[in-house]
Amino acid sequence: MSIPKIKSYEMPINLEVDNTVQWEPQSDKAVLLIHDMQQYFLDFYNQQQSPIPRLIANIQKIKQKCESLKIPIIYTAQPGNQKAEDRALLTDFWGTGLEEKEEQTSIIPQLSPSENDIMLTKWRYSAFKKSELQQLMKTWNRDQLIICGVYAHIGCLLTAADAFMYDIKPFFVKDAVADFSVEDHQMAIRYAAKRCSTITDTNQLISQL
């Protein structure tokens, strides 16, 4: 199996969410995670149609705000031509993955990392697995993780769940993630709200920061 071609859908900005917890982001405690915004993953969408233009615009707004507040910014990106032993069970679900080509592995141009941003190699659904993410946050004395990117019900959600289990407060930005379908997108939001995260949106997040 590989990633399916993704049909356009409206960003679920008006989805009613009952947050179990009402955490508020703090600029001196937060880290921004821009999750897997590589050309390979965006190419499964029609990038001129919803939800992608709003996704990109909202991540740009969030990043700009975080830069102004000196909030650390971390990107995840999967490598190309992964060895079978590194990819392991992912191959059974998704095939061989990315090729080692710039047009697949690169972060999309609209969100190119800045000089001070940190790139982490992404090996599993959770950004914490086999990476320095947890240690970096400990070093910075930060315990809040703002999550945006793709795909909402896979890597974004599993990263949020892992953050929770590491006593890091996740902030799942519902209009700065995208997914395979509106149903998957809504499921990720509802699960995160009930079990591991505070759900927020771009404008609310920026206002609170």
Image (cartoon, rainbow, N blue to C red):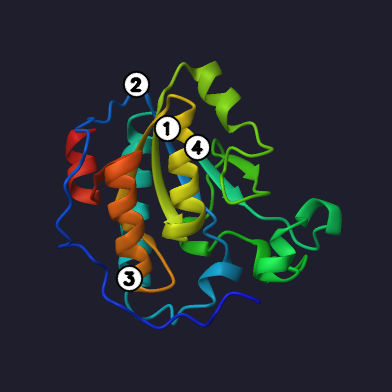
Residue 33 at x, y percent in the picture: 46, 42
CB under 8 Å between callouts 4 and 3? no
Callout 4: 10 Å neighbours few (<14), some, many (20+)? many
Of discs 2 and 1, which sits in the foreground? 1
Residue hosting label 4: 162
Residue at 73%, 58% in the rendered image: 89
**Disc 4 from disc 2: Cα separation:** 21 Å
- Looking at the image, is mark 3 or mark 2 earlier in the sequence? 2
Residue hosting label 1: 164
> Relative to residue 157, is residue 93 drawn left or right?
right
Residue at 31%, 26% in the rendered image: 27
Q: In this view, does 16 lie above or below 195?
A: below
SS label for mark 3: helix
SS label for mark 1: helix
- Looking at the image, is mark 1 or mark 3 earlier in the sequence? 1
**Disc 3 from disc 2: Cα separation:** 34 Å
Q: Pick the quarter of the image with the N terminus.
A: bottom right
Of discs 3 and 2, which sits in the foreground? 3
Q: Pick the quarter of the image with the C terminus.
A: top left
Residue 85 at x, y percent in the picture: 85, 53
Residue hosting label 2: 28
Between 163 and 57, the one nearer to me in the picture: 163
